[in-house]
Structures are given as structure tokens and as C-alpha cells.
Image (cartoon, rainbow, N blue to C red):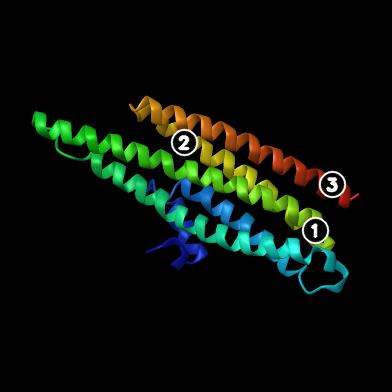
Amino acid sequence: MKFEEMTIKAFSDELASNSPAPGGGSVAALCGLLAANLESMVANLTIGKEKYKDGWDEMGKVLEAAGKLGVEFTNLMNEDTESFNIFMKALKMPKDTEEQKTARRAAMAEASKTATAVPLRTLESCVKAAVLSVAAAKYGNASAVSDAGVAALLAEAAAKAAAYNVKINLPGIKDEAFAKDCRERMEKALAEAGKYAAETAELVEAALK
């Protein structure tokens, strides 16, 4: 069953069980999804309110972008768990003969790449969510500025969580060029997520004084 088809309780119970998936990677994507949905909420609370007319255009862009991000994060929740299952399937492949060992190594190498690429994409999507939180705090309904702040916190936390899932998979990758690219993208995205989250926090704190 896809995660978006589960109740909150069913997902929570599955997460709390002894099954290793869903795990931190899917939760990171879920936090990103919640951030995007909060940004959509701020936009919906702004557009149509005459008091915030000057921000309608900006918040219209936020609404559209956050909607697309929500779909991305939902897909990433599922992909993260699927990638783990693919890795476990490769790990359980037979290794009695040299041919089997070679096939198993190749399958595990490919699965490790996928297991790294998915949380990296989650991390980069978190940057997009952090960017939207700045606009939500700047142009959104002032009564919902704290929600923009929560979105920024979630986006940054999800970014850091996704980075952990990149880091834990990197040692299993023998393709040095691929690993180097992943590390560079990870570090860049983490810095950007932190930057935009801090910018949002500054706007929120000023508004709440």
C-alpha cells in the first residue's frame, strides 16, 4: 500500500514496528511534505484577503510550487522504502558460485546508488521548501506567520534527516565519481536549506515581537 493511502495511525504503527522500513528516509520526506502543506495553507489564507492584496501574486506562486513539492515528497516517501527493499533483496541473493557472487555484488552496488540518490533528492526538495517558507513569512497572512516559521523548521530538519540517509549509504558505493557528486550536492543543499530557514526565522521572530 502506498503511504498516501494509509491512515496516520496505520503509518505510525508501521513506523513503530520492528520493520526497518519505513524509516528515517521516508520520515524525512514526510516532514518535507508537511512543510510544503503548511506553505500552501499560508498561501490559501492570504490569497483573496484584500488586506494582503500586494502579496497575492507571490503567494500564488508559493501555492503552485508547494503543490508540486507535495507530490514530490509523497513520491519520495514511497521511493525511499522501495529502495531499501530493493537493497535487501540484493543482499539476500545467492552467493554460492562466482557467477552468483558477481551478480550479487553488481545488484548491491546499484541498489546502494538508488538508496543514496533518493534521500539526496529529498534533501534537494527540502531546499525548495525552505525557499518557499521565506516567501510565506514575507508576503503571507500575518496571522499565519508562525506557520511559515514551522514550515522552515520542518524543511531544515527534513534536510538534515535526509542528509543522514545519504551519509549512511555512501560507504557502500564503490563508484568514486558518483559518491563525490553526492557528497558535493549534499553539502550544497544542506547549506542552502540552513540559509533559507535562518532567513525565515529572522522574519518570523521580527513579526512576533
SS of the residue under disc 3: helix
**Number of the label disc, if any, that sits on residue 139:** 1
| Mark 2 crowdedness (10 Å alpha carbons): few <14, some 14-19, many ≥20 | many
User: How far apart are the alpha carbons under marks 3 and 1?
Assistant: 15 Å
Mark 3 or mark 1, earlier in chain: 1
Amino acid on which the number 1 mark rests in the picture = Tyr
Mark 3 or mark 2, earlier in chain: 2
Locate residue 115 relative to residue 209 in the image: left or right. left
Locate residue 134 relative to residue 81 in the image: left or right. right
Amino acid on which the number 3 mark rests in the picture = Glu
Please report the residue visible at 35 percent of the width from the left and 29 percent of the height from the top.
172
What residue is pinned by disc 3? 205
Please report the residue visible at 58 percent of the width from the left and 33 percent of the height from the top.
188
**Residue 152 x/y as whole percent:** 69, 48
Residue 116 location, quadrant: top left
Locate residue 72 relative to residue 156 in the image: left or right. left
Amino acid on which the number 2 mark rests in the picture = Val
**Residue 62 x/y as whole percent:** 68, 60
User: How far apart are the alpha carbons under marks 1 and 2?
Assistant: 34 Å
Mark 1 vs mark 2: in front: 1
User: How far apart are the alpha carbons under marks 3 and 2?
Assistant: 32 Å
**Residue 84 x/y as whole percent:** 35, 45
**Number of the label disc, if any, that sits on residue 166:** 2
Q: How many labels does the image show?
A: 3
SS of the residue under disc 1: helix
Residue 92 visible in the displayed image = yes
Mark 1 or mark 2, earlier in chain: 1
> Between 108 and 64, which is closer to the camera in this rendering?
64
Above or below residue 175? Residue 84 is below
Evaluate if marks 3 and 2 touch, with contact meaning CB atoms under 8 Å apart: no
Please report the residue visible at 46 percent of the width from the left and 53 percent of the height from the top.
76
